[in-house]
Image: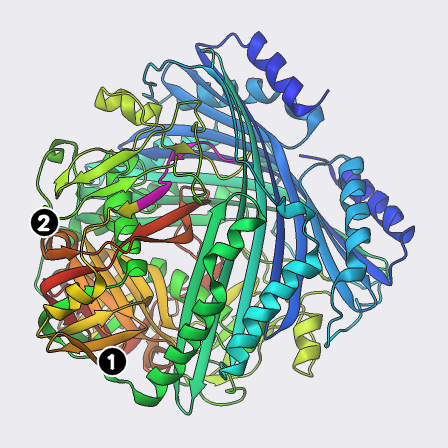
Amino acid sequence: MDLFHIAEVLIQEASYPYAEVRVQIDDQELIWLRNGELESYGTESVGGISARVLVDGGLGFASTSSEKKAKYILELAAKNSRAASRRGNVSLSEERFERAEFRVPTVKNPWDVPPEEKIEILRSLDSIAKEEGIVARSIMMSISKEVIYFLNSEGASVRGEVPRISISLILTHVSGQRSTQEYESRGGSGGFEIVDGWKLDDFMKEISKSMKERLEKGVPAPKGKMDVVIGPSISGLVAHESTGHPYEADRVLGREAAQAGESFVTKDMLGTRIGSELVSVADDPTIEGSYGFYLYDFEGVKARRRILMKNGIINEFLHNRETASIFGVKSNGAARASAFNREPIVRMSNTFIMPGDRSVEELIEDVSEGVYMRRFMEWNIDDRRYNQRYVGSEAYMIRGGRIAEIVLKPILEVTTPSFYSSVDGVGKDLEFQAATCGKGDPGQGVPVWTGGPTIRLRGVGLGGI
Amino acid sequence: MEGYEESLGFVEDILDLLYKQNLDEAAVHVRSARGDQIRFSSNKIDIANTWLDFNADIQLVKDRRIQIVSVASPDIDAAKLQIERAMKVIGSLPERKAYDELPEGPFSYPIIEGIYDPKLEDPGEKLSDIVTAAINSGLSSGAKKIAGSIRSGVEISCVATTTGVKVCEKRSNVYLDIRAFVSPESTGHSFSCSRMMNEIRPEEAGREAAEDALMSSKQVKVEPGRHDALIWYSAIGNLGGVFGSLAGAMYVMMQMSPYVSKLNEQIGSDLISIVDDPLRPGGYGSRSFDMEGYPTRRNVILEKGFLRTYLHNRLTAKAMNTNTTANAGWVSPQPWNIVISPGDMSNDELIEELRDGLIIRNATYLRFQDYRAGDFSAIIRDGLFKVEKGEIVGSARGLRLSDNVLRMLSNVFAVGRNSRQIYHWWMEWEVPVESPPIAVRNVGFTSATM
């Protein structure tokens, strides 16, 4: 009897107030080229079955990859739920469930593409950077397929299949005592055909030149109050870190308090202005081809677009069934689990600052003196998602509305409300980066897109020591 | 969890399969584990988890070509399928320029005391008892809200190769991670971790976290800039793990370490020594063999400020023309159990020695601007205590640790004598660390400019 069949039998026979069973199989192929040589080639198949049971306010979870033990998994989850009920107070929102199936179509099945073809793509990228003289290059390709079968005692039955591809680069350039690094990741869901659309050859050439130039010509970045224009890779990260995370309802409720932290946003801040009316931020798992794609979440709830910030006003939080129940709303389908042996928690999918109507040139030409931070390396944000820092890698002075000299490591260290309130121009050049968002205990890394256009901040401070 | 005999039997079955393939050599790593956890927040239990995990990793080598396959199922047919697929592919992979053979076994392995506690095989109600004790202790010590988790695990880990290695080891671990809140911004953190259930101290951890949260609520103003600082336990756990891991040879080869080209140079104060000691009895990361089957050994990374070795597996060692340090990782070598050597000051004496400065209780979210240069920043939380004339006078907010690995190592001016085993959720490179608090001159602190 395979795991899928075991799951069906288990849920039919479940006699708990609430029970769910999920079979998840994640297959992956990983290729890593370092300085043009194959450093590692590996494949993995991680699959198994998990169960969650809710009894008397206690939520219990258990998982196994063993078919032999699978039939006991509900029982083990129920035992845990009874232990949790000693101090537990969990409830789940009422939802309407359906039987559904979704599968991301592929033109060119990535698993049919031979490894040597994939290695050649990475080698070709490596040679571009090598020719430019970049001293250390790591290029990784990941091919994955996530298969999910979710069943619960309230009638949900969802089968999903999402193939994903990503390519990531880490480049280091050294000149004398100076060094600079860059990281980039592109990814999406679909067949191997999506790789062509990333135009990584052009990117590699451009970034390699930029790295060399900054070490040759870069001057220390200025400090003090000025206008700052940030590129899509930074605005996308900002959307993820300082809107996505603090709007996760489990963080708002303190569920992550001991781990990644809580949120400066509270339940009663819904409807409060937090930024310029030019800024809207969405999280949308239903974008076709996206890295964070899914149509039903890991609690069987139908996914939809969530507008987290609407014209500068806090509009909606990300919910699973547990947080939705506390807030008295319906789940908006934000429950995800990174593998069969992790319980579903509130997660982002594809989070982005929605595009405006300005070109990059227009955003820059209105700046008399400022900094254009096109890309970043270092970032972090405090555990309430209030005080954040982004350090530019590729960055330039803007003088008289024009790009001027290269500046090194400008530091934007700013609070979340100050950041969003200072936005006075939003570009139309929406771009997405692939990322793995980490959260939870034990940690769960899930694929997401971070996205945004070029945006302009008026009169923010650049800092550092 | 699969038993010892079952795990060993599975390893032998896989080896049998591998011997039948047309391979030069091969290695197998099997890990069978059970994990249990209770997570809590706002003084309530959020969830109780049990994981019955099984992983088999197989390294196949043919004509200097290496492929690694991993399966999560304890079903031999699943492993067989993956091996058969790999055999169709391995010939098409490029050869490695630098290759060294798997070690010839058998070896004699050290027996490390105190790394397995059978009580953790099925902890039952014990975990929720610990949670209750920690929450009650935190609340009675003045906290308004307690959050955290307790996680326990047991595992059987086996490595075998077609070159004569066959070894298994049972290990266990348990850690309690606790955070206390007096207000949303006044927080404290503590932990208790061990290989043994009865060494977990929930009352102490709850009290420590609550006391720090209370001190955090006593706000004082500190300007950004450079200040002398004491890096306390939770913080040195995270920083020490990162500073030790950067000695991994793969980071060095990728130019992603400030230790590139600095072997045998003095890169730190003569007060600082960092050792990877997997042989330490009861060490949270102690183990007797690495992933290639070599017996582990004590490696001195930093000796009185001098960088003495990088950490190697057989492949990075070959590439750098040296010997393995028994830190494999099949792809990247890694430290097992970082120990920062203790100095001679008590914790009170350290604070007195600091005189005027800051105590960083916890440092999280460490990110590099440039790994090679060593420039990084990290979020400070759970107390940044201001010390004036050797006394703690309050806690600062909104400052970020912004510095450089080499500068910090060079500026160590005092090391405590009271070491603790440290492991908690924010050990982001996941290496256990044993360390006392460390005092560093002129640490950089920045803040939001608006």
Quadrant of the rendering where the C terminus of chain A is positioned: bottom left
Above or below, comparing residue B140 to residue A115 in the picture: above
**Which of A404/B412 is in front?**
A404
**Which of A462/A290 is in front?**
A290
Mark 1 or mark 2, which is nearer the start of the sequence?
2
Residue A121: percent from left, percent from top: 60, 64
Residue A279: percent from left, percent from top: 16, 47
Q: Which residue is mark 2?
A: A276
| Residue at the spot 27% in from the left edge and 71% down from the top edge | B402
Locate residue B182 relative to residue A285 in the image: left or right.
Answer: left
* Amino acid residing under circle 2: Ser
Above or below, comparing residue A228 to residue A418 in the picture: below
| Residue at the spot 80% in from the left edge and 70% down from the top edge | B101
Above or below, comparing residue A235 to residue A84 in the picture: below
Q: Visible in this render: residue B429? A: no
**Residue A27 found in image quarter:** top right
**Which of B82/B14 is in front?**
B82
Quadrant of the rendering where the N terminus of chain A is positioned: top right
Q: Residues within 10 Å of mark 1 (few under 14, many from 20)?
A: many
Residue A252: percent from left, percent from top: 23, 36
The span picked out in magenta is: A342-351
Q: CA distance from mark 2 to mark 1?
A: 28 Å
Question: Is A347 part of what is drawn in magenta?
Answer: yes
Residue B129: percent from left, percent from top: 42, 30
Q: Chain letter for mark 1, please.
A: A
- Which numbered dot is residue A407? 1
Q: Residues within 10 Å of mark 2 (few under 14, many from 20)?
A: many
